[in-house]
């Protein structure tokens, strides 16, 4: 299927590894030029160069911490300088947390609020004017199944991802008149490097391997009984970016192998 995305420009945060990198590769396969944003400059530049060589698209690597307002201004300025703006915005940067309400300081709450919510707000505020000039576009915010079905050990992550879902709905209602569609994706178990690292830590010194832990976790939590690959999830991002999803506005989509235990 032709996704009708050739020569569009996408800004992808957290774009050098995991889900963000898979989305970047999937969009590049459709001929989309990329602004890749992440903190680790060397890895970011390496992945950007590889994608450009593999798919024949233009890539721009912008080293930035999107939890910081000043760095987001840099992303907007660099995108405008290189491409005159963007058509697609993928707010993907984020990370899990580990705390209880009683032991988490205000500073940790504030950091996750800046990373998961305000980064999306600020990037939209900075890039939407250019989208309007280009005739419209698509914004996809990557939240989590935990926005609706929380995990016990990460209340801050759960709360800020839930806020991102509501922010997405409000933004969608405001921007659809400009032909800018906003949607949110709530992934379940996606086999990213973070999951592999966590599994290795949890199984260190035990009789179980990291792979055995992850396999059992997927069987316990999901009817499908396995993790998804980042590439499987990325294909859904591409569809939502495309004109084929033209009637998808302000919705939250669960890509979770059946893990969600309620009717969404």
Image: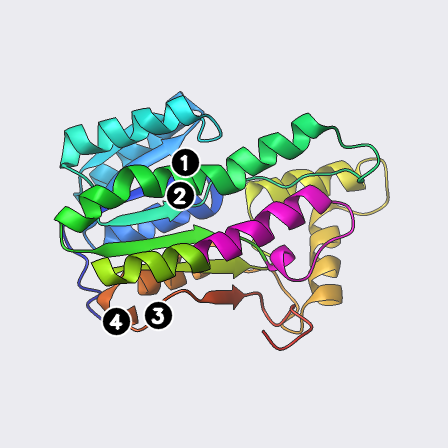
Q: CA distance from mark 1 to mark 2?
A: 5 Å
Mark 3 closeness class: few <14, some 14–19, many ≥20 residues within 10 Å: some
Q: Main secondary structure of the magenta part?
A: helix
Which label was assigned to residue 21?
A: 2
Mark 4 closeness class: few <14, some 14–19, many ≥20 residues within 10 Å: some
Q: Residue at x 75, y 52 (%)?
A: 213
Q: Position of residue 144 (x, y in %)?
A: 57, 55
Of residue 40 and residue 132, the one placed in the foreground of this image is 132
Q: CA distance from mark 4 to mark 3?
A: 9 Å
Is there a contact, CB below 8 Å, between mark 4 and mark 3? no
* Residue 163 appears left or right of 54: right
Q: Does label 2 or label 4 sit earlier along the sequence?
A: 2
Which label was assigned to residue 244?
A: 4
Indicate whether 260 appears above or below 184: below
Q: Does label 1 or label 4 sit earlier along the sequence?
A: 1
Q: Residue at x 27, y 37 (%)?
A: 35
Quickly name the residue at label 1: 16
Magenta extent: 145-168
Quickly name the residue at label 3: 248
Front: mark 1 or 4 = 4
């Amino acid at each position: 299927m032709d996704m009708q995305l050739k020569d569009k420009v996408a800004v992808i945060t957290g774009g050098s590894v995991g889900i963000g990198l898979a989305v970047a590769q999937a969009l590049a396969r459709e001929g989309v030029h990329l602004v890749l944003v992440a903190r680790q400059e060397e890895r970011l530049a390496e992945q950007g160069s590889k994608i450009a060589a593999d798919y024949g698209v233009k890539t721009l690597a912008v080293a930035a911490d999107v939890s910081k307002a000043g760095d987001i201004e840099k992303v907007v300025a660099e995108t405008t300088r290189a491409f005159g703006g963007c058509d697609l915005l993928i707010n993907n940067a984020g990370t899990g947390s580990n705390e209880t309400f009683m032991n988490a300081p205000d500073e940790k709450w504030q950091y996750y609020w800046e990373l998961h919510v305000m980064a999306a707000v600020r990037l939209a505020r900075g890039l939407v004017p250019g989208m309007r000039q280009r005739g419209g576009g698509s914004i996809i915010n990557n939240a989590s199944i935990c926005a609706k079905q929380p995990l016990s050990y990460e209340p801050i992550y759960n709360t800020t991802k839930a806020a991102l879902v509501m922010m997405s709905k409000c933004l969608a209602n405001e921007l659809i008149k400009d032909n800018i569609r906003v949607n949110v994706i709530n992934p379940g178990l996606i086999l990213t490097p973070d999951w592999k690292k966590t599994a290795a830590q949890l199984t260190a010194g035990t009789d179980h391997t990291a792979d055995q832990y992850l396999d059992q976790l997927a069987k316990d939590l999901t009817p499908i009984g396995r993790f998804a690959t980042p590439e499987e999830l990325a294909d859904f991002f591409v569809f939502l970016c495309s004109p084929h999803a033209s009637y998808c506005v302000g919705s939250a989509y669960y890509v979770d192998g059946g893990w969600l235990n309620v009717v969404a």
